[in-house]
Structures are given as structure tokens and as C-alpha cells.
Image: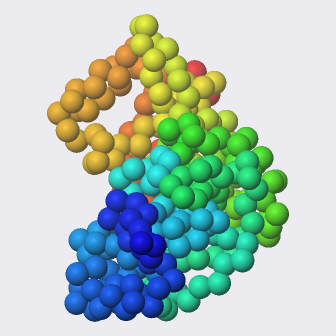
Amino acid sequence: MKKHFSYAAPGILRSKDNRAVRYGLAKAAASKKITKLLPGVYCQSHLEDDPLTLAGAALIYNPNFVLLGEIGAKLQFMPDLKPELITAACQSAQFSARQYPKFRFTRASIPDDLKTSWGSGFVAAPEISVFHMSLNDDYSALCEALRRKVVSAESLINAYQRLPERSSLRNLDCVTKARGNPWSLPELEMQELLSAFGITGWRGNITTKISGRNFILDIAFEEQKVAIEIDSEKYHLNQTAFHEDRSRHNLLTAEGWIVLHITPRAIRRSPKEVIKQVASTLKCRSWQ
């Protein structure tokens, strides 16, 4: 007996060209036993909001699709990310976002060496997903990809030059931001604040060795031995971080470093005061 539907992936059901089967699946979807995700592609109803299920469904619908953006970042370096939409690119994509709001299909050509196999289709290289998210002023993927060392300023430049369509100034701006090597959005904001006020001579997330231990400094003026540490509540308020921060501060101070502790709130609410503190510290150090 010829099969007219198959389990294409865990939880995903794909119908083929058979009127009776299509009718049966449509009836099951109407009774909410299964959920229609795309033409001919269904899933178990409890999986309808699962990003991996949705990503798999998109590639079953069209194996030529390349996943990118938030879902690309999730699959490659941001596992805890919860994409609002599954974004995929194809040279000949034609799709109505009004029909299937969980997906966004776009027309784009991605070179073969900037994508890799996943499921029944492809996922874009991390650089492409970073670029795509930056188009919406979301640089979280850039910072996390730099932190995990899956991209660099150089790899972003190379990817940018390989893209057939390089019209977006946002992509080029993303490359510029990457040169500071920010590992979080607050670090990026601090770096941009320094640049806006013409303060140069710093580097982001450099490693320095003190008393046999390696320390990564958020922002460092190596010549003046002035460090800026961005202290967010997320990473610096638990007991372990509290004690580690004090030990780190003391060791840096003993080696002649001045450490400025700046919060994301201060960067956003009192930027001029933050810059005044940094400039004054650098000026005092230059006199010594």
C-alpha cells in the first residue's frame, strides 16, 4: 500500500498528494488534535510553539530554506533564546506571513560556505544570523557570539564581503561594533559611550595575568592600567560572584590597576557622569 503521509521528524507529520489524507489531516487540525504549521506540514498540538519543531517544519516544507536570525542563533550559540518567529531564506521564497504568523520567509541568496546542514535543510553561519538580528537593532547575538568566540571582527568582515547583497549599512555597523569585542549589551553601550566622547586607547575583554591567574577585563586602558568593569545585577549579585569580584579587585589594585565599577543603569541614566569619572581617572593616572 502506498503511503501518502510520513513522520518527517519527531512530532511533525507531512501529508503528500492524496485528497483523502489531506481531508483527514485537515479534519484532525480543525478538532485541534494536530496543528497545521505550513501547507502539508502538521505537528502534535503540544509542540506548536516549540522552536525546534517549527524550524524542522520549515525545512520539511522547503529543504532549500536556510534558517537564520534568532532561530539560527539558537541552534548554534544561543541555546536559551526563544525566537518569536522562525526566519528562513531562499532564493525563490514566496510566502504569505498573514497565513502562517509563526514564520517569516525571505528571498535571499546565501553562499554555500556560509551555511551548514541541519535537519532536512540548512542553517546559516553564525555571522549571517548576527547580521540578520542587527537589522532590528538587536546586538545580543553579536555580543554572545563574540563571547563564545564563534565569530570575530575578521570573520564578520569576510562574511559581509561574501554576501551578494551588501546594501545594508546596519551590517557594516555591526562589523564596526565587533571591533570593540563586547561580550554583553551593557559593555557595548559603554564602548559606544566612550567612542561618542572621543575617548580612545581602550580594548574590550583583554586577558591579563596576575599572581598566576588570568583575568578578563571588560574594558581596559592598558597603558594607563585603568580597567572598567560593567557590574550588572544578573552576574554580580550572587554570593560566589560577590567574593570573586572582591578578590579580583584586590589583586588588580595590588598590581597597580585602577578599577572603575560601572553599572548598566549608570551608563543609561547618567552617561555624562560616567564619562566624567573615566576622564578624570585617566587624567590623574597620566600625571603619575
The count of marks equals 0
Residue 261 higher or lower than 98, as above or below: above
Q: Quadrant of residue 269?
A: bottom left
Residue 156 higher or lower than 208, as above or below: below
Residue 14 higher or lower than 39, as above or below: above
Which of 72 and 254 lies nearest the eye of the viewer? 72
Farthest-out residue, left: 239
Camera sees residue 285: no
Which of 15 and 250 lies nearest the eye of the viewer? 15
Q: Which residue is drawn at the image coordinates 28% and 79% (left, top)?
A: 34
Question: Residue 79: x percent and y percent?
Answer: 39, 50
Q: In the drawing, does residue 156 fall left or right of residue 288?
A: right
Quadrant the C terminus occupies: top right
Q: In the drawing, does residue 260 fall left or right of residue 179?
A: left
Which of 133 and 250 lies nearest the eye of the viewer? 133
Camera sees residue 166: yes
Q: How is the image coloured?
A: rainbow
Quadrant the N terminus occupies: bottom left
Question: Residue 123: x percent and y percent?
Answer: 58, 56
Q: Which residue is drawn at the image coordinates 28% and 40% (left, top)?
A: 236
Which of 39 and 169 lies nearest the eye of the viewer? 39
Q: In the drawing, does residue 77 fall left or right of residue 13?
A: right
Q: Which residue is drawn at the image coordinates 43% and 7% (left, top)?
A: 212
Question: Residue 220: x percent and y percent?
Answer: 55, 32
Question: Residue 239: x percent and y percent?
Answer: 17, 33
Q: Which residue is drawn at the image coordinates 60% and 26% (left, top)?
A: 222
Farthest-out residue, front: 1
